[in-house]
């Protein structure tokens, strides 16, 4: 096992051992607080361009299996763990985590103090970093730091085209069909589609660059914008498409990146969080019910809404309720339009690894579709 170096943009260096593939990788360094579900994290397209630090110290003990994949590949730019499991011990395991990382060429590092690293990121904020192992680690620290500083910033970066489907495809509804949803794939997770299909929704998934006319021509009962990576401010075309959907009063639901794009379509700004929300233990208040949900997150950007909880849409779409809010830092975690059939949440109600407190949001989508049909 060769030496590996994690070099941060601010000059801090962590020395550990190579894990997964050897070589060099650059990306935005972020931490995820989940104690389980590492495979769902790795295969979530929302993590494209990011080097993920697992705050839980022991990773890899349950191996990996094809059923838990959220997509067809590992998307993280790099992976940081403290104590990788020496063995795989789970009846569902099909292979080991390091073998999976090697398969997809994910340069990773183990054996570092991830607690100290996380505390540093909570103070300094997410930043660019690089993992270097093998021959790539033989350069001087100054040379490695220069490579890190040459990497792209996440702010202003559009990544949807890198993670979206190449062409449109359909998924049949399970049981009795109750409606059809047109999905704009900005980095969608498999479990999102499964939740919708299980509720009797036929699904047609479109690439990120789809135009509004194509979506409308598919005759959907609702339009859905998925999760995904990148800066929402760099997705102006998707925002314009969404505004056309809202003007047609076609029901809309968005998750994570889809929430940020709904915010921008309604005329609100978005901004970059200092270190973001990532993990499966984030408390959120649903203001429409008063209930607190434990939720799964992966976002480094958020919607900015001044005042509230009920405000007017700056873009002229009527009243908007900040329907969900983070109990850690009051970040906007959900929007509900009161004059048009549109709503969204910043977190992940489809969380395959759990928690499942927010699965009801897919039921809300069905209710909105059925109510809209009655109104017609």
Image (cartoon, rainbow, N blue to C red):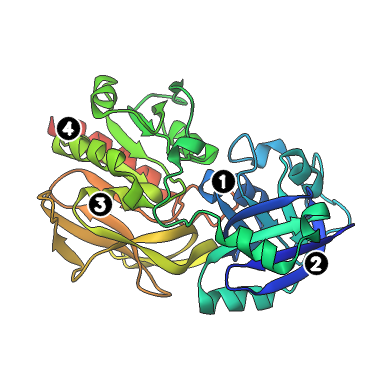
Residue 59 image offset from top left, x and y in percent = 75, 59
Label 3 crowd (10 A; few <14 / some 14-19 / many >=20)? many
Q: What residue is shown with label 4?
A: 374
Name the secondary structure under disc 4.
Answer: helix
Residue 323 image offset from top left, x and y in percent = 28, 61
Q: Is residue 266 left or right of residue 155?
A: left
Give the alpha-carbon distance from disc 2 to disc 3, as whole Å: 42 Å
Name the secondary structure under disc 2.
Answer: strand
Give the alpha-carbon distance from disc 1 to disc 3, as whole Å: 23 Å
Residue 87 image offset from top left, x and y in percent = 88, 54
Marked residue nearer the N-terminal end (1 or 4) = 1
The nearer-to-camera label among 2 and 4 is: 2
Q: Residue at x 62, y 48 (%)?
A: 40
Q: What residue is shown with label 2?
A: 16
Marked residue nearer the N-terminal end (1 or 3) = 1
Quarter holding residue 336: bottom left
- Which one is in front, 335 or 45? 45
Q: Can see residue 59?
A: no
Q: What residue is shown with label 1?
A: 44
Name the secondary structure under disc 1.
Answer: loop
Q: Residue at x 44, y 40 (%)?
A: 160
Label 1 crowd (10 A; few <14 / some 14-19 / many >=20)? many
Marked residue nearer the N-terminal end (2 or 3) = 2
Give the alpha-carbon distance from disc 1 to disc 2, as whole Å: 26 Å
Marked residue nearer the N-terminal end (1 or 2) = 2
Q: Is residue 56 left or right of residue 363?
A: right
Give the alpha-carbon distance from disc 1 to disc 4, as whole Å: 36 Å
């Amino acid at each position: 096992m060769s030496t590996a170096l994690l070099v941060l943009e601010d000059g801090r260096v962590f020395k550990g051992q190579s894990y997964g593939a050897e070589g060099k990788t650059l990306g935005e360094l972020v931490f995820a607080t989940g104690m389980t579900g590492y495979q769902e994290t790795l295969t979530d397209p929302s993590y494209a361009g990011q080097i993920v630090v697992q705050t839980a110290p022991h990773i890899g003990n349950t191996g990996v299996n094809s059923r838990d994949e959220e997509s067809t590949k590992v998307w993280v730019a790099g992976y940081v763990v403290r104590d990788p499991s020496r063995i795989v011990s789970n009846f569902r395991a099909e292979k080991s985590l390091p073998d999976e990382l090697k398969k997809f060429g994910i340069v990773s590092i183990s054996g570092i103090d991830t607690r100290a690293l996380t505390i540093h990121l909570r103070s300094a904020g997410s930043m660019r970093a690089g993992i270097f192992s093998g021959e790539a680690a033989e350069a001087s620290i100054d040379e490695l730091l220069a490579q890190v500083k040459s990497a792209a910033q996440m702010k202003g970066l559009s990544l949807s085209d890198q993670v979206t489907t190449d062409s449109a495809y359909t998924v049949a509804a399970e049981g009795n069909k109750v409606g059809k949803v047109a999905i704009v794939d900005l980095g969608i997770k498999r479990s999102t589609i499964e939740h919708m299909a299980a509720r009797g929704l036929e699904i047609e998934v479109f690439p990120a660059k789809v135009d509004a006319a194509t979506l409308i021509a598919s005759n959907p009962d609702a339009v859905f914008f998925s999760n995904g990576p990148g800066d929402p401010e760099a997705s102006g075309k998707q925002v314009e498409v969404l505004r056309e959907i809202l003007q047609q009063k076609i029901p809309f639901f968005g998750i994570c990146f889809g929430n940020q794009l709904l915010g921008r379509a309604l005329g609100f700004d978005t901004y970059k969080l200092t270190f973001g929300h990532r993990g499966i233990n984030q408390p959120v208040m649903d203001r429409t019910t008063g209930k607190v949900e434990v939720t799964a997150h992966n976002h480094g950007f958020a919607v900015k809404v001044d005042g509230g909880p009920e405000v007017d849409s700056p873009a002229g779409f009527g009243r908007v309720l900040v329907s969900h809010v983070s109990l850690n830092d009051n970040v906007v975690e959900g929007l509900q339009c009161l004059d048009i059939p549109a709503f969204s949440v910043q977190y992940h109600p489809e969380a395959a690894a759990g928690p499942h407190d927010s699965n009801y949001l897919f039921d809300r989508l069905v209710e909105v579709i059925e109510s809209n049909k009655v109104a017609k």
